[in-house]
Image: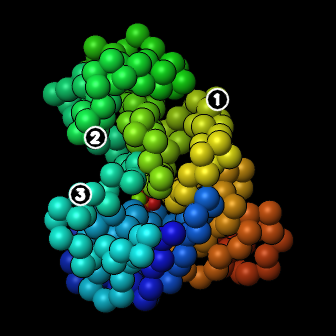
Amino acid sequence: MIRIRNLHKSLNGQAVLQGIDLEIHDGETLAILGKSGSGKTVLLKHIVGLLKPDRGSIWVDDREVPKLRRSELFRLRRKFGYVFQASALFDSLTVYENLALALRDRGYPETEIEEKIHQILELMGLQGNEEKYPSELSGGMQKRVSVARALITDPKYLLYDEPTAGLDPVTAETINDLMLSLKSRFRVTAVLVTHDLRCALRVADRIALLSGGKIRIVVPAEETLKIKDPELQEFFRSLEFRA
Ligand SMILES: Nc1ncnc2c1ncn2[C@@H]1O[C@H](COP(=O)(O)OP(=O)(O)OP(=O)(O)O)[C@@H](O)[C@H]1O
Ligand SMILES: [Mg+2]
């Protein structure tokens, strides 16, 4: 379980997170919606200790993330798959090598690494691209490699930062299906940041709205469209307008 209590963070003198309280239960997928610049990515980075809070804290499986020593933090991060908003692949490594890194780090034998990479590339519709470099792939293909890299270690927790942004509807749907199947088959616990309301409603169990540095509302996905909260409705209208 992930527990966030009274999390405050200012960056460049701007109060970005102003008292976030949130729990993500084991096996659930929680979607976080919020305007651009509202602090969604900053919040995800705190969960894996890439940023440290000014006040408040984060617990993952009862370990207090900001208090962990470097070595403990690295061990904790092995439980996570993180699909970064920008693809964050290593430019100087091929697709194969990008995917192999985390598996080698965990001591998988090379034959198993090869097998896992072939499986995941096929699943993502990327077979035959093993030897390409990220710069030789389209933006959508890079995004799919990033998703593959997050999934390949079978993590307990998955953090998805805009996993379908910039993808065509068919490919986006493949990623939605994948997120759903990870949830039902492996009870993966996930946080999904997205501007895609349809994706959130389809994949998430609960939906949270981040605004003004706080979580304004958390609702079961199936009730989201019925909630009479003016801010939530305004936000939905803005999404429809964008779409
Ligand atoms: N490393 C940083 N240094 C300084 N300011 C930062 C840093 N990271 C984020 N910020 C600021 O914090 C605020 C929230 O950024 P964040 O990236 O979390 O937004 P977001 O909700 O993910 O937006 P988007 O939907 O556009 O991705 C922004 O004002 C941003 O400029
Ligand atoms: Mg972001």
Neighbours of disc 3 within 10 Å: few (<14), some (14-19), many (20+): few
Q: Amino acid at mark 1?
A: Val
Q: x, y percentage for residue 128?
A: 41, 10
Q: Amino acid at mark 2?
A: Arg
Residue 209 lies left or right of residue 94; in this view the side is right
Residue 83 lies left or right of residue 207; in this view the side is left
Residue 97 vs 66, above or below: the answer is above
Q: Quadrant of ligand 2?
A: bottom left
Which of 82/231 is in front? 82
Q: x, y percentage for residue 30?
A: 60, 63
Q: Amino acid at mark 3?
A: Phe
Q: Which mark is residue 106?
A: 2
Q: Tell me the residue that label 1 is attached to.
A: 170
- Residue 118: quadrant of the picture: top left
Q: Residue at x 55, y 57 (%)?
A: 189
Q: x, y percentage for residue 62?
A: 42, 76
